[in-house]
Image: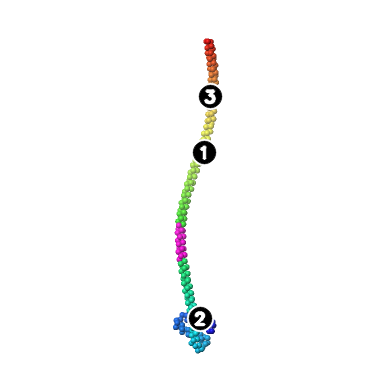
Amino acid sequence: NLYNHDEDDNNLLDYIDEISSLSPTDLTDRLNKECQQILIKQNLSLSSYDNLQLNHYALMAIYLLYKQHLTDDAKQLYNETLIRALRQEYELINNEKHDYMEKYNEAEENYLNKLNLNEKKMHQLQNKYEELLEHNELERLDSKKLLNDLAEKYEFNLYNLHQENENLKYNLSNMSQSREKSLGNDHNQLQSEYQQLRQDYDELISENELLKDYNSQMYQRKLQRNTDDQ
């Protein structure tokens, strides 16, 4: 069989590649020419083959060409299908990309909005912190001044209190001395007055006893007189 040889197969493949782009007329002429070349290459006499055999070789070549075209069509169909699938996948990926970009832009916008809002809040908090810091500093200075004033006032009052205490001690000492002196004088005077009163009392008692005796005598005399008169 002619087509069991690798060389013949390679020749037919080369042949198919060469004539794949020919027009139908050129293809027919080329088929006849190639059939003759194959026969000559195999050292076969053209006269030993009738037209039926030549046509048989031509049909075999055409069949191989047909299979090649089917393969090309299959390749083309595969390529078209692959391209279409790739295009669909590209469109899907592109759509996903657009969706992702939209989501990314939306997320970025939200992030920037939140960032701006956080920056505003941070700025407000910073201002409030500075105001509180300034207020605390003023209060600290006021408290320090107040403490200094209170300390000065306390020291002044303490000094005055100390002076008053010393004066009170001095006055108390003078008063104690004066009181002791006064009590001594008063005691002597009271003792003298007591002695005088005691003396006066004793005199009154004596006079009272005398008066009692006198009254008793007068009463006895009166009784005696009345008795004598009877």
- SS for tag 2? helix
Position of residue 71 relative to residue 147, above or below, is: below
Mark 3 lies on residue? 193
The nearer-to-camera label among 1 and 3 is 3
Report, in whole angstroms, how far the alpha carbon at label 1 lies from the one at label 3.
Answer: 44 Å
Given the current orientation, which residue lies at the most extreme top position? 229
Q: Which region of the structure is painted magenta? A: 98-117
**78 vs 140, nearest the viewer:** 78
For label 3, count other residues whose C-alpha is less than 10 Å away and answer few (under 14), some (14-19) or many (20+): few
| Nearest to N terminus: mark 1 or mark 2 | 2
Mark 1 lies on residue? 162
- SS for tag 3? helix
At 53% from the left edge and 83% from the top edge, which residue is drawn?
A: 3
Q: Main secondary structure of the magenta part?
A: helix
The nearer-to-camera label among 3 and 2 is 2
| Rendering coords of residue 178 (x, y %) | 52, 30
| Nearest to N terminus: mark 1 or mark 3 | 1
